[in-house]
Amino acid sequence: MMDADTMVLPRLGPAEVGVEDPWGEDRPRRAPVRVARRPARWRVAAWLLPALLTGGLGVVGLDRPGLRAEELDTWRAATSPWRDLRSALAGDEATLVPYHLLIRAWAALFGAADPTLRVPSLLAMTAAAALVGALAARMFTPGTGVLAGLLFAALPTSTRYAQEAQPYALAVCAAVLATWLLPAALDRPGVRRLAPYAGAVVLLGLCQPAALLLLAGHGWVVLAFRRAAAARWSATVVLAALPVAALLWAGVRAGARLAPGVRVDPAALVASPRNLFGVAAVGALLAGLALFSLPLRYAAAICTAWALVPALGLLLVARTVPVWSPGVLLFTLPAWAVLGAAALSRMRAGWAVAGLAAVALVGAPAQAAARAPDGHGQDPRRVAAIVDGLRQRGDGVLYADPTARTVVARYVPADRRPADVLADAGPLACAGCPDGHRRLWLIRSGTAAAPPGDGPAERALRAGYRPAQVWRPTGFTVVLFVGGRPASA
């Protein structure tokens, strides 16, 4: 097997369609003539149209969903006093420290409103869409680039995470950038080409260390097609991974925690397509299209390895370590979009447009749901509206977890918040005591029944309070306790 652009033996005789080119892509065709006359325009369209669509979709409803728990952690990191920042970051996931520092600098310049905190993700996903189109145009044709970029922009998860104050969009952008730089780095593996690639890998690791699984896909491409560059590529990625490893080591020693996950099981696997693509049907459609773009050509092989090898690696690790999370694999979305576009580009223009429209239509309900007040899985503004609207003078509040406390700090004005009765970590005053509160609010994350134990609810009951009303906004539970005995029926 030769170290070439394909993994098959060269043809020994003329053939209309060869093994290396099973779809006849290298044969002269009349269809692309109009494109060839204006190659510059189409190459610009390949990155400009996806960027405009992604940016436009991302702006729509950017401020509607409330900040979910992880985004509230971002807001807390962005607004905490500098003297409290070290202790705040010590409780973070070690992988989020660089992102939280970036957002703190961003908030210092532009403020910490909900949409403002999400703008870096929107910009990163817009840049990722432009790079997806440009990458596909370079690997295949400008028309394929337009289709790939628009497919990527139409995926519900692309705009969903473009509107979230989390590092996922930045990791997606870094993954596309690293893959864009890979072919040049392998064709001419000098410092001039390897240094930008190493920079993209460092950026990827700082945004989302788990996304370094992309290097497994890149490594497969190196071994299959560019073995002569394997030593230099390996040295480059090891050096690029050192800052990320040092950061994780320092974070864990300082008390930070690693990102949680689950061990892989059938239920987790069944839920993965929906979590990754936004709609399970969209994932099935893209996977079906990808099957028609898998000839062993260099360009298609890069995207195939990008889409599949990281998922297989994560699957193997998750069998023993609880790290499985579909969100970790968001950086593979561009690869699926490019493979799907490569298949659509082999069809007539009408069928290609129909396929693109099918993806957009199937994903439309998920696009709308992501822009609802609880579109990110929780509705913290509803919690604030309940507490602020029904609060009375002298009310107290019990927080069952840090997220509940941050919800009130973010969305309820300081002069309208109930008193935090456990702020001094002292005992809870009884309902009838002079220093007790006539009413108590209990706020906690989740809507399932609280586990038994010595939690805030049990402490309120022991102090003589009784639950008077319960609300369950999406992702939260709010209970109003009042003093005295239950009223007679």
Image (tube, rainbow, N blue to C red):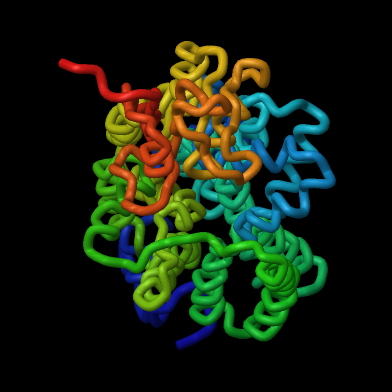
Q: Position of residue 73 (x, y in %)?
A: 61, 42
Q: Quadrant of the C terminus?
A: top left
> In the depicted view, which residue is nearer to us: 274 or 297?
274
> In the depicted view, which residue is nearer to us: 131 or 125?
125
Q: Tell me the quarter of the picture where residue 165 sits.
A: top right
Q: Is residue 361 left or right of residue 101?
A: left
**In the picture shown, does residue 138 fall above or below 118?**
below
Give the farthest residue toward the bottom.
Answer: 1
Q: Is residue 378 left or right of residue 93?
A: left
Residue drawn 42% across and 33% down? Answer: 378
Q: Tell me the quarter of the picture where residue 215 sits.
A: bottom right
Q: Position of residue 72 (x, y in %)?
A: 58, 37
**In the picture shown, does residue 226 fall above or below 382?**
below
Q: Can residue 175 be seen at all in this image of the molecule?
A: yes
Give the farthest residue toward the left.
Answer: 489
Q: Can residue 134 be seen at all in this image of the molecule?
A: no
Number of marks in the image? 0
> In the depicted view, which residue is nearer to us: 195 or 113?
113
> In the depicted view, which residue is nearer to us: 113 or 370?
113
Q: Position of residue 445 (x, y in %)?
A: 43, 40
Q: In this view, does 447 lie to the left or right of 394?
A: left
Residue drawn 60% across and 44% down? Answer: 426
Residue drawn 52% across and 73% down? Answer: 216
Q: Position of residue 437 (x, y in %)?
A: 51, 25
Q: In which quarter of the image is the N terminus?
A: bottom left
Residue drawn 60% across and 57% down? Answer: 93
